[in-house]
């Protein structure tokens, strides 16, 4: 597809808030791949950081060291027409050096784009509300802001700076794409060209859970019925107290938690859950292994906290669970309410436990087909095509 608004522009600079090599892929990596499949060349910029550096956290220190090693390294071509660049920049709270940051970043970006024969004014597709701390919008033909989270509400974020910069980005972007109605309302305060596209799924990948694949040994060792959660086990996202109450209320149900503990929120405490005999932490798993784990679950959970961050969040795992054909029990999350026919919603721990049992006992194949049909309509390639049609119009 060639978008009319960028007649000669088949080059896109995509500024992410997630490193390409992060084990848990999100919108950013999948959208970059979809754009390449649709005929574009993509220059993917790894996350530049939107929260405070935690010097006591090994992960943060390791990431800083990796970036320093790549200070003047060239972009990597990870697949045909897709390059990944990991620039080393100063943390955004070093205000006195922000000018130096901007000059260094802009010069290096311009240099690498020229080396790769990108056009002089590519399209800029960003997920980072701090984008214009690093570069000027005048260097691009069009600006797309793909707003997928309320980043200012993440633990440790530079909230005031992000909110201020994001307002300017909303105003200057030619197109704003949002993944939830809450983000849509926020964006409409500053932009007239806002389009709602919910989160989607790599359908073929997660649909493998419906096929004849093996269930990993560590999950096989856990007794049925199994109610499982796959994702970041972080206190600001996951209602850990609710999970404790549910595990106590359902002693014969195995509660399986798959993911890194404290991802994005190092203050996360899971001590109470660890004490319960029917709660199993299996740790983070590779992306290619997730369908195998979904295969072995009887019901999937989205036990999200209800707070300022999650009110604007469309959980990626929702369509991933549906693509696996699994029944879902979720807390009362605004973003997925329009799909109420294919999942169960529960407002408290007692209702959550009852809905889990109901889904375990009444898993109708008709409902499974409904779940699969909805997931199949909501893929990265389909959504990216629809986004580009917005640019055409």
Image (tube, rainbow, N blue to C red):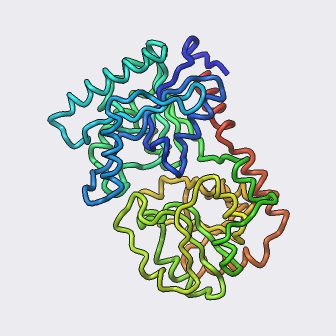
Q: In the displayed structure, would residue 320 be above or below residue 108?
A: below
Residue 95: in sight, yes or no? Answer: yes
Question: Residue 65's image quarter?
Answer: top left
Q: Nearer the viewer, residue 307 or 2?
A: 2
Q: In the displayed structure, would residue 1 be above or below residue 78?
A: above
Left/right of residue 41 with respect to residue 224 in the rendered view: left
Q: Position of residue 326 (x, y in %)?
A: 72, 64
Left/right of residue 32 with respect to residue 272 in the rendered view: right
Left/right of residue 168 with respect to residue 142 in the rendered view: left
**Residue at screen point 67% across, 22% down:** 1
**Residue at screen point 45% across, 43% down:** 19
Residue 144: in sight, yes or no? Answer: no
**Residue at screen point 60% across, 57% down:** 317
Question: Residue 346's image quarter?
Answer: bottom right
Q: Position of residue 258 (x, y in %)?
A: 56, 66
**Residue at screen point 21% across, 33% down:** 98
Q: Position of residue 10 (x, y in %)?
A: 57, 18
Image quadrant in which the C terminus is located: top right
């Amino acid at each position: 597809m060639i978008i009319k608004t960028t007649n000669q522009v088949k080059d896109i600079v995509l500024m992410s808030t997630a490193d390409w090599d992060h084990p848990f892929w999100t919108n950013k990596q999948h959208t970059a791949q979809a754009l390449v499949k649709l005929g574009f060349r993509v220059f993917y910029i790894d996350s530049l950081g939107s929260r405070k550096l935690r010097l006591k956290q090994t992960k943060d220190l390791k990431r800083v060291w990796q970036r320093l090693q790549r200070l003047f390294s060239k972009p990597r071509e990870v697949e045909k027409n897709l390059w990944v660049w990991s620039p080393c920049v100063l943390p955004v709270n070093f205000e006195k050096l922000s000018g130096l940051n901007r000059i260094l970043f802009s010069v290096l970006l311009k240099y690498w784009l020229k080396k790769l024969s990108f056009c002089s004014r590519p399209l800029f597709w960003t997920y980072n509300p701090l984008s214009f701390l690093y570069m000027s919008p005048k260097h691009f033909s069009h600006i797309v802001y793909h707003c997928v989270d309320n980043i200012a509400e993440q633990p440790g974020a530079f909230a005031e700076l992000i909110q201020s910069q994001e307002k300017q980005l909303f105003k200057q972007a030619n197109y704003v794409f949002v993944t939830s109605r809450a983000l849509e309302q926020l964006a409409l305060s500053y932009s007239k060209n806002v389009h709602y596209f919910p989160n989607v799924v790599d359908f073929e990948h997660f649909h493998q859970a419906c096929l004849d694949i093996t269930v990993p040994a560590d999950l096989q060792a856990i007794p049925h019925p199994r109610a499982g959660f796959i994702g970041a086990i972080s206190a600001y996202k996951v209602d850990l107290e609710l999970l404790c109450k549910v595990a106590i209320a359902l002693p014969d149900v195995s509660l399986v938690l798959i993911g890194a503990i404290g991802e994005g929120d190092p203050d996360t405490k899971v001590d109470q859950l660890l004490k319960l005999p029917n709660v199993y932490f299996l740790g983070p798993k590779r992306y290619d292994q997730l369908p195998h784990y979904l295969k072995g679950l009887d019901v999937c959970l989205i036990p999200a906290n209800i707070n300022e961050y999650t009110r604007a969040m469309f959980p990626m795992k929702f369509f991933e669970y549906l693509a696996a054909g699994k029944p879902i029990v979720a807390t009362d999350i605004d973003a997925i309410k329009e799909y109420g026919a294919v999942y169960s919603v529960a407002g408290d721990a007692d209702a959550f436990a009852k809905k889990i049992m109901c889904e375990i006992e009444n898993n109708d194949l008709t409902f499974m087909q409904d779940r699969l049909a909805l997931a199949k309509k909501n893929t990265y390639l389909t959504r990216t095509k629809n986004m580009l049609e917005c640019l055409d119009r």
